[in-house]
Amino acid sequence: VEGVVLLYDLRTATKWRILQGHEHAVSALAFSPCGELVVSCSMEDGMLRWWLSGSTGIFGFLGLQGSCQHVTKLEERPPKGLAVSLEWASPNSVLLRCNRRVFGPFTKP
């Protein structure tokens, strides 16, 4: 389904989290080094979405359905059709890369 991120538990081969919020296809995704946050990006939406990925906190009460913690609008973005990637620059910020150009950093408040 377009705009949905499915996270699987590879140990049990079961769906672990459903992260729904983008209106269009997800272009890039990155887990934070500590594994507690996930950031997803849709170039068509022009949005970054920040999610909790751990089993504590809000996810402990929601079951499979995840909740977006914050949305960051991309004021400047790469041209359409080019591959992009996300890279964590710090515990609360990411860089968006396209070819050799870097956009950001984008910081979760």
Image (cartoon, rainbow, N blue to C red):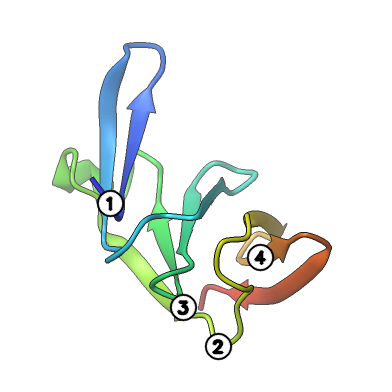
Q: Which mark is residue 75?
A: 2
Q: Which mark is residue 72?
A: 3
Query: What is the distance, in whole Å, between disc 2 and disc 1 at their CAs?
Result: 22 Å
Q: Which kind of residue does numbered mark 1 sit on?
A: Glu
- Along the polypeptide, which appears first: circle 4 or circle 1? 1
Could you tell me if the residues under marks 2 and 3 are in contact, i.e. CB atoms within 8 Å?
no
Say which amino acid is labelled 4: Leu
Give amino acid for label 2.
Answer: Glu
> Residue at position x 27%, y 66% from top?
23
> Relative to the observer, which residue lies in front, 53 or 5?
5
Select label 2 or label 3 by which is in front: 2
Q: Quadrant of the N terminus?
A: top left
Q: Amino acid at mark 3?
A: Thr
Residue 40: image location, x then y, percent: 46, 57
**Seen from this angle, which residue lies furthest right?**
100
Q: In the image, which is nearer the foreground, mark 1 or mark 3? A: 1
Q: Is residue 78 above or below residue 30?
A: below
The quadrant where residue 20 appears: bottom left
Cβ atoms under marks 4 and 2 closer than 8 Å: no
Tag 1, which secondary structure?
A: loop
Query: Is 1 rendered above or below residue 109?
Result: above
Label 2 crowding class (10 Å Cα cut-off): few <14, some 14-19, many 20+? few
Judging from the image, what secondary structure is the residue with disc 2 in? loop
Label 3: few (<14), some or many (≥20) within 10 Å? some
Say which of marks 3 and 4 sits in front: 4
Disc 4: which residue: 96
Please give the label number shown on residue 2: 1
